[in-house]
Each structure stands twice: as structure tokens, then as C-alpha cells.
Image (spheres, helix red, strand yellow):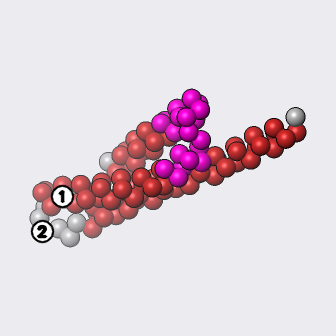
Amino acid sequence: MILFILVALILIFDGIAIHFHKTGKMAFWLSGILMGFLAPIVGFSLGYLFLQLSRTFDSTSTHEGAGYAGAFIFLGLLANAIVFFFIGIIIKIFNKHKSEQT
């Protein structure tokens, strides 16, 4: 379930970033920075939601899984943001180098 949520969030974030890049509204490196700022908010919010669900279903548990799930989602989204940032920087350098040659 957690992996499904992570993949769905990555697909949503990536789809929005690619759409904005194709329309020329936002560069990949800027999307990566924005995703990097949104990753902790989304990760900790989902961790809190998982904690509340865990407390609802089993009040005697230590609820460690909720924290691990939130951290896993945060780290996955952060890694995705870092990849987008570096791809954006590489594209920017490539385009700059290509325009200087012509």
C-alpha cells in the first residue's frame, strides 16, 4: 500500500513537472527545487495520517510503521526531486553549450 502511494505521488509530481516543462512555464531544475520543498510536507502529513489510522485500528500498538512509512515516502519524493534538479541542470548546460556553438 505504501509503495503504491509513493509511486502514485511520484507519477503525479513528475507528470506536472513534465507538463510545465513542455509548455515552457517552469524548468526542470526549478520543479526539482519545488518538489524538494514539498517532499517533507507530503511525507510528514502522510505519516501523521498513517499514525491516526493506526491508532484507530489498534490502540495497543507502538505505531512505528506509520513513522517508517512517512519517512519512506519522504525519502522517495526527495530522491525524485534531486533527480529532477540534476536533470534540469544538465539540460540547461547542454542547451547553453549548444547555443554557443551555433
Q: Badge 1, how many Cα within 10 Å: few under 14, some, many 20+?
A: some
Q: Residue 71: x percent and y percent? A: 38, 62
- Give the residue pinned by disc 2: 60
Q: Nearer the viewer, residue 68 or 92?
A: 92
Does the magenta portion include 21? Answer: yes
Q: Residue 94: x percent and y percent? A: 76, 43
> Is disc 1 placed on a helix, strand or loop?
helix
In percent of the image, x 56 and y 47: which residue is there?
A: 30
Question: Which is in the foreground here, disc 1 or disc 2?
Answer: 1
Residue most toward the top?
23
From where the camera sits, is residue 82 visible?
yes
Does the magenta portion include 45? Answer: no
- The numbered dot on residue 52 is 1
Q: Nearer the viewer, residue 14 or 65?
A: 14
Q: Residue 72: x percent and y percent? A: 40, 59
Is 89 positioned to the left or the right of 20 in the image? right
Q: Residue 73: x percent and y percent? A: 39, 55
**What range of the chain is rendered magenta?**
15-34
Q: Nearer the viewer, residue 33 or 7?
A: 33
Q: What's the residue type where badge 1 is placed?
A: Gln
